[in-house]
Amino acid sequence: MDFPMFHLDWLNDRFLIAVIAILHVFINHGLAVGFIPYITWLEQKGVTNASKDQITDLNWDNLIYKKMKVAFIITTTIGAMTGVGIWFSVALVSPSSIGSLIRVFYWAWFTEWLVFVTEVILILIYFLTWKNSNTSLKAKVRHIKFGWFLSIFSWITMAIIVAILGFMMDPGNWNNEQTLLNGFTNPIYFPQLLFRTPTAMLIGGVFGMLLTTIFTKKGCDIRAKAVKYASKWILVWTPLVIIGAVFYWSVMPSAMKDNMSTAVGSMEFAQYYDLLKYFIIGTASLSVLLALFALMKPKKINFAFVIVPCVLAFGFLGIFERVREFVRKPYVIGNYMYSNLLREEDYPLYKRDGILKHATYTAITEITEENKIEAGRDVFMNLCSRCHTVNPQGVNSITYVFERMYGFGKPLDKNSMAAYIPNMHNGRTYMPPFAGNKKELDALVAYIKQVQQTGESLEGVQTSGVKINPLNSVKSVTEKLEENKDYSED
Ligand code: HEC
């Protein structure tokens, strides 16, 4: 409403964020937060296990270095780019919500930025000075210390961001007293952090084991040794993943749990909802099985053994992120802003005046028979386009969801749609309540009906350009000021 509406009519706007964000979380959790401490721990083992006359076991050290190289290359390229990419994509798709979050978490984000820059410097030092540090024990010990610092800083960046993610799900008492501290200490924060930390460690360990099978020969001693360490790491963290998951589940508001079935897939997949539970249990038990087997028969472990648990562990994290994004619906920021970017407290105003009068980017504020379709398009853009596409081939397209209810291929009935939309929030609580007035409802219905007939798509401002609300034009604002002047003179 307050920002021009960027829109992808085939991919669906939510998907754009999801794809970039999930890739980022894979890299952040799997290759930084969980992986760096694992690598540092192994580097340290190389020193403690070395014979008296050596600084470290050089073969071992070289293996760990190679693993770190993979993490270094991926985190500093795709990892960093997707991190910035999240900012770009959310600013395009959901500018009002990111604006609100910046206002609340300004200093948290500022701190996070400082920590992040430190993290980047530390990872450069840690990776690039690795080989040189092997010249003296003192240098090696210092190098290992850098590894631990890097681990701590990677974790802190996550710990700050998780506060914001928890806040979006349930701001707790921030809605009564809007302070940073209240936002930070939201009820979902600690449980989510306690879940994410061991999950990152688990994924780091499984991925580490996978790399071992790539960088070493089957049956050799060094592989057996590395595989055993990975197993121990996995066995320590997996129980904490389960405890964290249970804790996290227990604080999730019940309205969110009700959304869970649609969150895992879409409505078509609701019946597979139980899969999520099995996915968590399956991933955890498979990791434990792998670790136990690897402890007993380390020389038997090869790529084929590890790849399935590894893919499952990443898949598990991906599903978790998708669910987290979905269950907070209809809100983008719990009890404060709906996913259509309208604030809950502004709803009475919209109900009274309609949304178009208050929209900054719309060509129409007074709906007539002639401009009805165009007005309907603007209503759709403002109220539905964050989650639905128009193009019949698009993801979650609006004609598809209506036809699914009323029959595929049948002409949509305006009256049924007009009766459904004002109540859609009650039946499908993940959708925000309809914010417009009666005329806007009729315009929206006429637009959807036309879309069904023409199969047209909807262009976002990136193609169509912006149209400014005529009530905000210089002329009408001057007129308004004049009116107010008369009024104050009276
Ligand atoms: C917060 C995101 C969101 C917004 C905003 C939203 N929807 Fe939906 N809508 C969904 C999701 C998700 C589904 C379920 C899709 C699925 O599972 O296939 C859905 C389903 C529907 C359905 C089918 C419901 C059923 O029971 O089968 C209709 C009709 C619908 N939406 C209309 C609208 C209209 C009209 C608007 C705008 C006024 C709108 N939606 C806004 C997310 C949203």
Image: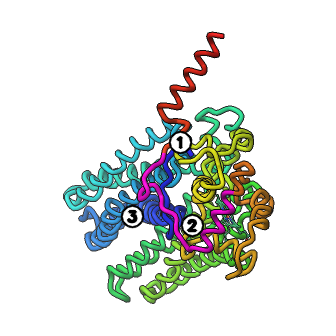
The structure residue drawn at horizontal position 32% and vertical position 54%, both measured from the top left corner, is: 123
- Label 2 sits on a secondary structure element that is loop
Q: Is residue 350 visible?
A: yes
- Label 1, on which residue? 469
Residue 387 in the image, given as x and y percentages of width and height: 60, 62
Instruction: Name the residue nearer the viewer: 306 or 139.
Output: 306
Residue 237 location, quadrant:
bottom right
Q: Which of the image's four quarters has the C terminus?
A: top right
113 vs 278, left or right, is left
Residue at 79%, 67% in the rendered image: 416
Question: Quick check: 26 above or below 486?
Answer: below
Residue under the point 47% across and 70% down: 205
How far is mark 2 from mark 1, CA to CA? 23 Å
Q: Amino acid at mark 3?
A: Ile
Left or right of residue 261, residue 292 in this image: left
Looking at the rendered image, the disc whose residue lies closer to the viewer, 1 or 3, is 1
Q: Earlier in the sequence, mark 1 or mark 3?
A: 3
Question: Magenta region: which residues?
Answer: 443-467
What x and y, as percent, mark residue 155? 47, 52
Q: Earlier in the sequence, mark 2 or mark 1?
A: 2
* In this rendering, position of residue 88 left or right of residue 291: left
Dominant secondary-structure state across the stretch colored magenta: helix
Tag 2: residue type?
Thr
The residue carrying mark 3 is 39
Give whichever of 330, 482 is nearer the camera: 482
Give the mark count.
3
| Res 286 → quadrant | bottom right
Please give the residue where the numbered disc 2 appears in the rendered image. Answer: 389
Marks 2 and 3, how far apart at CA: 45 Å
Looking at the image, is mark 2 or mark 3 earlier in the sequence? 3
Question: What's under tag 1, amino acid-wise?
Answer: Asn
